[in-house]
């Protein structure tokens, strides 16, 4: 797609205030060229989108639809997404620069989330609660209302599907704000869902940057915010929602430790490490970014990881042979290069990469960084403590298990972690001791619709996916029914019995 197009989100279709909207250029990060323009929504348009969603919730068919019918809708949505996967993964690759082989593999799984939540909806049971006396007590779950979903640039469609499928399954209406850099597949997805039967106004989209997200997060009629992004954005969302006691699920930053023990083949561990560190050009909240390697295999591991990093094919993400694409923007590329330089200044050794690759002229304006290995690092270095969000693996040696666990937990983040070992007992033991919301043993990045996704400490709060996410889009009502043949007579009885 070489031509530039202007795409109109829902709330921007008819202006609702006198403010002149600004069209935002959407850049292909592989070339630095404009591929679309999308209007930034105004604050008033955010308010309008929420109003539309609230009306759809209060008087529209979606929340009142029988559960079985909503489940059938979700299954139809999944089929429609599957039928359009080719278009979606090409569009996403062009928008965020992820290699098309990676994008195809990831987006092919998006329908699973809609099918999983349709299954939860069909299987959902209301609890009957134990109690004494002639009473039947049970619980009912109801949708929250208008839910806001704010998604990031790195996995725009998968992360949206994760939350959107649960929010819709449980009967909510939704306002979505995609990253201002990668709105294209979000806009395309909503069109696909509507064509597949999603009622009007159940999902609306607003586009733009910080001001739009802040208004959506702080809006008094939004019952829940689901946000994936930086820690400071999550902190602001937590404060804004707390003021009105709204719910928030925030999946934020990470500095994922991957512990490599010396009982595993360093070549095997290095291949796993390369996948953990360099997939999506390292632009993943759970990217393996600090590798804690036992000293007995340390040198062999660094050598093998450096060889793999140097052999990764960098280039046009639309070409199937490409293994590593660009970063999302020049700002992000420059940040990553600065951190690499900082690592070297603080004493780390650049064992592979470290700069901008030499690429053909048509990619010369793209935002590329070589896969980089920073060896001989220490836990006090900036690169071992701060999230880099680029294709950079920081390698730190350790001696014993206790030291490795201490080093892994020595960070303000707690999203993901990895353990590589052939000792299954140690794998379980270390996974239990590491403070992180998700731990992989002898693998990385593995996820399923049924697996709760989220972190602790400054990596956020709440969980996306799984039963936990499904339930968190509802509120619980407890109903107590007296079944006794006689009536309550507290004041007229000589021995009234229990007060409550």
Image (tube, grey):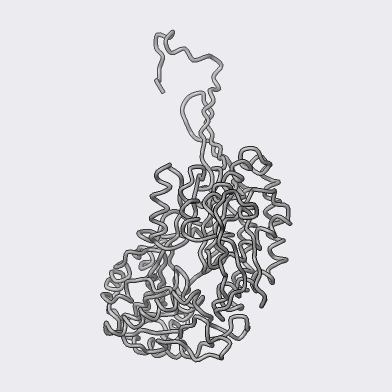
Instruction: Give how far across and how far down residue 475 sits, in percent.
Output: 51, 41
Is any atom of residue 171 visible in this view?
Answer: no
Residue 486 at what x, y percent from top left? 53, 14
Residue 155 lies, in percent from the top left, at: 54, 67
- On-image quarter of the C terminus: top left
Residue 75 versus residue 185: which sits nearer the camera? 185
Taking the image as shown, residue 447 lies to the left or right of residue 348, namely: right
In the picture, residue 353 is in which quadrant?
A: bottom left
Residue 286: x and y in percent read 44, 69
Q: In this figure, what is the number of numbered marks? A: 0
**Relative to residue 181, is residue 419 drawn left or right?**
left
Q: Is residue 299 placed above or below 338 in the rendered structure?
A: below
Q: Is residue 468 left or right of residue 303?
A: right
Above or below for 45 versus 335 = above
**On screen, residue 92 above or below 227:** below
Relative to 27, is 266 above or below? below
Say which of 47 and 404 sits in front.
47
- Residue drawn 44% across and 74% down? 332
Q: Nearer the viewer, residue 162 or 229?
A: 229
Pick the residue in front: 451 or 374.
Answer: 374
Quadrant in the picture for the N terminus: bottom right
Residue 129 in sight here: yes
């Amino acid at each position: 797609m070489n031509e530039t197009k202007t795409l109109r989100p829902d709330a921007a279709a008819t202006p609702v205030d006198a403010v002149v909207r600004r069209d935002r250029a959407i850049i292909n990060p592989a070339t630095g060229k404009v591929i679309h323009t999308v209007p930034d929504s105004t604050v008033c348009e955010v308010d309008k989108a929420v109003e539309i969603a609230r009306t759809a919730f209060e008087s529209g068919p979606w929340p009142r639809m029988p559960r079985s019918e909503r489940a059938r809708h979700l299954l139809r949505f999944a089929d429609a997404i599957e039928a359009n996967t080719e278009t979606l993964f090409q569009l996403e690759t062009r928008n965020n620069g992820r290699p098309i082989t990676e994008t195809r593999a990831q987006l092919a799984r998006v329908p699973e989330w809609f099918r999983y939540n349709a299954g939860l909806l069909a299987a959902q049971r209301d609890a009957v609660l134990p109690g004494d006396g002639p009473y039947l007590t049970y619980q009912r779950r109801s949708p929250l209302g208008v839910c806001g979903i704010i998604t990031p640039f790195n996995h725009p469609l998968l992360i949206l599907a994760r939350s959107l499928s649960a929010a819709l399954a449980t009967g909510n209406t939704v306002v979505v704000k995609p990253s201002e850099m990668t709105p294209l597949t979000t806009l395309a997805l909503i069109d696909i869902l509507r064509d597949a039967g999603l009622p009007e106004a159940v999902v609306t989209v607003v586009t733009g940057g910080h001001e739009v997200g802040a208004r959506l997060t702080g809006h008094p009629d939004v019952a829940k915010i689901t946000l994936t992004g930086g820690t400071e954005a999550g902190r602001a969302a937590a404060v804004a929602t707390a003021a009105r006691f709204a719910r928030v699920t925030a999946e934020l930053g990470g500095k994922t430790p991957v512990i490599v023990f010396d009982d595993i083949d360093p070549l095997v561990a290095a291949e796993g490490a390369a996948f953990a560190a360099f997939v999506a050009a390292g632009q993943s909240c759970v990217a393996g970014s600090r590798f804690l390697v036992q000293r007995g295999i340390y040198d062999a591991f660094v050598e093998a990881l450096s060889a793999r990093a140097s052999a990764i094919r960098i280039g046009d993400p639309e070409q199937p042979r490409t293994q590593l694409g660009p970063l999302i923007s020049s700002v992000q590329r420059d940040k990553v290069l600065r951190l690499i330089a900082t690592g070297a200044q603080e004493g780390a050794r650049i064992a592979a990469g470290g700069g901008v690759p030499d690429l053909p002229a048509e990619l010369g304006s793209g935002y590329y960084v070589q896969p980089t290995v920073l060896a001989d690092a220490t836990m006090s270095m900036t690169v071992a403590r701060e999230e880099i969000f680029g294709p950079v693996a920081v390698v730190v040696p350790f001696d014993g298990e206790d030291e490795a666990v201490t080093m892994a937990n020595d960070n303000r983040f707690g999203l993901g972690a990895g353990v590589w070992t052939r000792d299954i007992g140690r794998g379980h033991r270390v996974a239990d001791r590491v403070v992180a919301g998700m731990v992989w043993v002898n693998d990385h990045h593995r996820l399923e619709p049924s697996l709760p996704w989220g972190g602790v400490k400054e990596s956020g709060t709440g969980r996306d996916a799984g039963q936990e996410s499904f339930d968190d889009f509802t509120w619980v009502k407890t109903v107590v029914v007296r079944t006794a043949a006689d009536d309550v007579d507290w004041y007229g009885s000589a021995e009234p019995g229990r007060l409550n």
